[in-house]
Amino acid sequence: MQRIGPFLFAVLATISAFFLVWSLPPFQTADEPAHIYRANMITHGFWVAAKVQTDGRIAAGGPSDVAIIEAYFPFHHVPFKPDERANLEDFVKSFTARWDGRVFNVAAENTAPYPPFFYLPQAAAIAVGKAIDLPVVQTLYLARAANALTCIAVGFFALLLAGRAHLPLFAVLLLPMSVSLYASMSQDGLVITVTALGIAFLARALSEGRPLRSAEVWASAVCFALVGMTKQPYALLCLMPLAVPAERVAVKRLAVAASLAAAVGWAVWMALAVQTPLIRQDAPTDAMGQLRFLLDNPLAVLTIAVKTFQVWGDEYYQQFVGILGWVDTRLPRPYYAAAYLVLLLSFLPLLLGRRAADWYSGAPARASAVTAAVVLATGALLFGALYMVWTPVGQLWVDGVQGRYFLPLAVLLPLAFASGRQEAGAGWSSGGWSAGMTGVLERGLTWMVWLFPIVSILVVQRTVILRYYLD
């Protein structure tokens, strides 16, 4: 059965992603203008962004085409306003914008520090659109499609390699939030699927009860290095190969050190050469002032942690599964509960027939401990970073954290349960369940997880059509 999953993922992800590629109005995924700016810089030869003069100030960014702004402007009334619709007049005006060679320096502080690797599919599509004189909007659709196909291909190979971890990976990779990122200009779709590929190399060795081969060590290290370069807290993912024994310990240590050096090195380079402070229009921020506040009030950290989840917890709960558009298009409330139930059920087959010793000794214990430590530490750094740079000084909760930031962390979790081969007469079967009944239960759970994305597709299609097109 395990071989069915990757192919089923490819079919379901293609249907779901390409619906969103064409049905979401232009520039209607979170920060899509900033992401198209970053991809477009590559077509102008700026593989790495720079500090540029724009709007009378120095900002992180680079060259971009005026036509992008002209294409976006007709739809600028739609984000954050659930009652606004994308009408025919908006599309007509937007389609008049074409690539005509007019270039200006654009400020894109939130995407400028990102590496170019996860923007290559989008940049290639933009280059093709310019070459064949497509309107900007059609080029945007082409770039979304290129990103979606790349994400689906990487996700397919991740599931093909993932061993016993394949089912929870399948569930996370087909959440509406994940699929909407595949179908956008954002790098986040590839961040999720490349993380899954890195975990797949590790999970395969655990599933087969053997140490990592050197090729698997380096392959996973490259995946985590690329992901670690995108957001500074994700650099901790470079430690994940430590969770699994390797044939050559020295090789594993070298690979982990190299990947961590690449991720940290990129962050330092960007901080020194490219980054400029993020500007929040509705409230002043000051990283040094925030640091002084924390040093003067160290016990406030606990209050901030509790208050943050009181203020934003329900948003994280929904955003992780999927609030589409500019985080303004919610799915039906019962769907979120169903999606979380399916996520939990996707882990259950990993536990069926598992030996008791797998919980507390050897490789399984190491995998669980390293995974838990990396997930918790990375989550804490995500909150800490946004408290410093995006939260007003002294505020007792963190602003700016989005539920989608936790999707790469969710991809790590199957590794904590992927070790230990199933054995007849162990686990549940020792309590009176026969091996045959355990197999039936596992198959039933697997099909439930495999078929749930069909429900997701129908729910997402209905939500998008009602939100953007029907009064």
Image (cartoon, grey):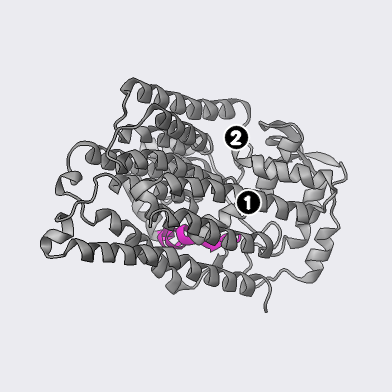
In terms of secondary structure, what is the magenta stretch mainly? helix
Q: In this figure, which residue is indicated by the disc labeled 1?
A: 31
Measured Cα–Cα span from mark 2 to mark 1? 17 Å
Is residue 165 at least partly visible in the picture? yes
Residue 230 as seen in the image, left or right of residue 450: right
Query: Disc 2 marks which amino acid?
Result: Pro
Q: Residues within 10 Å of mark 1 (few under 14, many from 20)?
A: some
Estimate the x, y position of residue 246 in percent, counting from the top left: 31, 29
Asked if the stretch drawn in magenta spans residue 317, the answer is yes
Q: Nearer the viewer, residue 388 or 337?
A: 337
- The percent position of residue 438, horizontal first and vertical second, equals 23, 63
The C terminus lies in quadrant: bottom right
Q: Quadrant of residue 244?
A: top left
Label 2 or label 1, whichever lies nearer to me, is 2
Q: Residues within 10 Å of mark 2 (few under 14, many from 20)?
A: many
Mark carried by residue 50? none
Taking the spot 48% from the left edge, 65% from the top edge, the residue there is 453
Mark 2 vs mark 1: which is more N-terminal? Answer: 1
* Residue of label 2: 115
Q: In which quadrant of the rendered view does residue 42 lie? A: top right
Residue 136: percent from left, percent from top: 79, 52
> Which quadrant holds the N terminus?
bottom left
Quadrant in which residue 108 is drawn: top right
Span shown in magenta: 311-327
Q: Amino acid at mark 1?
A: Asp
Helix, strand or loop status at disc 1: loop
